[in-house]
Image (cartoon, rainbow, N blue to C red):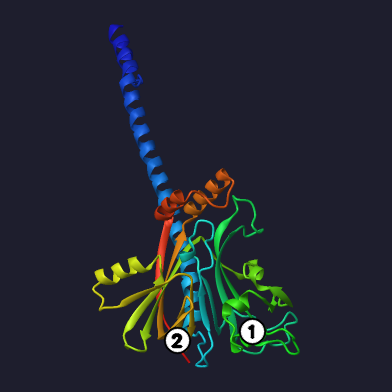
């Protein structure tokens, strides 16, 4: 039966499965590799963008905390017309790689909304609103002082002596911060001594202020690699607006004002210390007649990547201070600067 055999043979060839050729397999493999590579690249880029975004948010958040606190304190700062010094800025020393010009100690008196309003028993209310406040940049571990080099970071502390400790405790033999100022002492002299302060639980005790300032309860922000100030005041003799900045900042400030075509503003500089009375400014011990009108604050914050880079070099060099040139490179790459201007009203 030749016809039947031919028909069966034709049907078997019709249902035969065709295999992929080597070229087809190689082509499919290459296409899959390209797809996977692009998918991985997209995933890596997305992760990098996310990390960069989170890093940017963190640095902006730290800067906002600092600038909001400074704005809040200086907008309501007490400067009484009594001939005493109520605000003082002191550039005592460098803090590891941060030069003294960018690590000021800021001391003032102001109402403090963050102050404790009750003692530990939560019954006895603390009278008063005005507190002695100090800002200080330190380089230490948040867990220990100073701690291992890999743990040491740049931190801004804001220490506020509660209102009762500022005004003075009843029957206390020692002068309070406010009593010191009214007796003619400077804020810096007060912060070199001791005072009655509250711990985080609201328990009062006398503490040495130089070490208490950097207590963990006074932590404000991390990664603070620079804090610069420019003071604008009215010269009471010429009635013109003038600027006052640290020696290291003066030249660049002068150039900035000139490039911005700001009306003529004389830029004065100081070396280490500025004190403010009502209608008077004491610049490195020399008193001039001027009324403080505003302060421009600029804060530079290291991103988490920058902070890690600095700590790694500290550990590698077994020192809290790394090569200054390398620190400056890290600061340029990972540092973000934010600023604000705060008007000052004098009472």
State the residue position of label 1.
Answer: 166
Q: Nearer the viewer, residue 306 or 277?
A: 277
Extreme-front residue of the structure: 286
Residue 228 occupies quadrant = bottom left
Q: Residues within 10 Å of mark 1 (few under 14, many from 20)?
A: many
Counting labels gives 2
Is residue 50 placed above or below 227 in the rendered structure? above
How far apart marks 1 and 2 lie (CA) works out to 24 Å
From the top left corner, tell me how far across and down residue 309 is, in percent.
Answer: 50, 49
Q: Which mark is residue 153?
A: none
Residue lying at 60% horizontally and 89% vertically, measured from the top left: 182
Mark nearest the camera among 1 and 2 is 2
Is the residue under label 2 in contact with that under label 1 (CB below 8 Å)?
no
Q: Residues within 10 Å of mark 2 (few under 14, many from 20)?
A: many
From the top left corner, tell me how far across and down residue 316 is, in percent.
Answer: 56, 43
Q: Nearer the viewer, residue 169 or 268?
A: 268
Circle 2 SS class: strand
State the residue position of label 2.
Answer: 280
Circle 1 SS class: helix
Residue lying at 58% horizontally and 87% vertically, measured from the top left: 184
Is residue 136 rendered to the left or right of residue 146? Answer: left
Extreme-top residue of the structure: 1
């Amino acid at each position: 039966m030749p016809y039947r055999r031919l028909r069966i043979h034709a049907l078997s060839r019709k249902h035969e499965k065709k295999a992929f050729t080597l070229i087809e397999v190689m082509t499919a493999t290459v296409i899959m590799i390209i797809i996977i590579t692009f998918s991985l690249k997209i995933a890596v880029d997305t992760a990098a963008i996310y990390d960069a975004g989170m890093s940017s948010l963190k640095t902006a958040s730290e800067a906002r905390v600092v600038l909001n606190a400074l704005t809040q304190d200086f907008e309501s700062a007490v400067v009484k017309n009594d001939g005493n010094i109520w605000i003082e800025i002191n550039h005592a020393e460098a803090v590891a790689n941060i030069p003294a010009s960018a690590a000021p100690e800021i001391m003032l008196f102001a109402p403090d909304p963050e102050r404790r309003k009750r003692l530990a028993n939560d019954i006895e209310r603390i009278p008063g609103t005005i507190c002695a406040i100090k800002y200080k940049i330190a380089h230490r571990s948040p867990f220990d002082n100073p701690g291992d080099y890999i743990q040491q970071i740049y931190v801004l502390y804001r220490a506020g002596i509660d209102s009762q400790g500022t005004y003075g405790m009843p029957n206390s033999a020692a002068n309070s911060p406010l009593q010191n100022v009214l007796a003619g002492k400077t804020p810096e002299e007060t912060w070199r001594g001791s005072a009655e302060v509250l711990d985080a639980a609201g328990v009062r005790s006398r503490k040495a202020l130089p070490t208490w300032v950097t207590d963990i309860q006074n932590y404000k922000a991390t990664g603070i690699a620079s804090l610069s100030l420019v003071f604008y005041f009215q010269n009471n003799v010429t009635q013109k607006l003038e600027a006052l900045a640290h020696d290291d900042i003066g030249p660049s400030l002068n150039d900035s004002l000139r490039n911005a075509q700001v009306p003529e503003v004389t830029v004065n500089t100081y070396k280490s210390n500025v004190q403010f009375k009502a209608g008077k400014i004491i610049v490195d011990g020399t008193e001039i007649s001027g009324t403080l009108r505003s302060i421009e604050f600029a804060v530079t914050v290291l991103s988490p990547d920058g902070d890690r880079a600095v700590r790694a070099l500290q550990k590698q060099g077994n020192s809290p201070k790394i090569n200054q040139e390398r620190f400056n490179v890290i600061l340029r790459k990972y540092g973000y600067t934010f600023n604000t201007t705060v008007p000052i009203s004098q009472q």
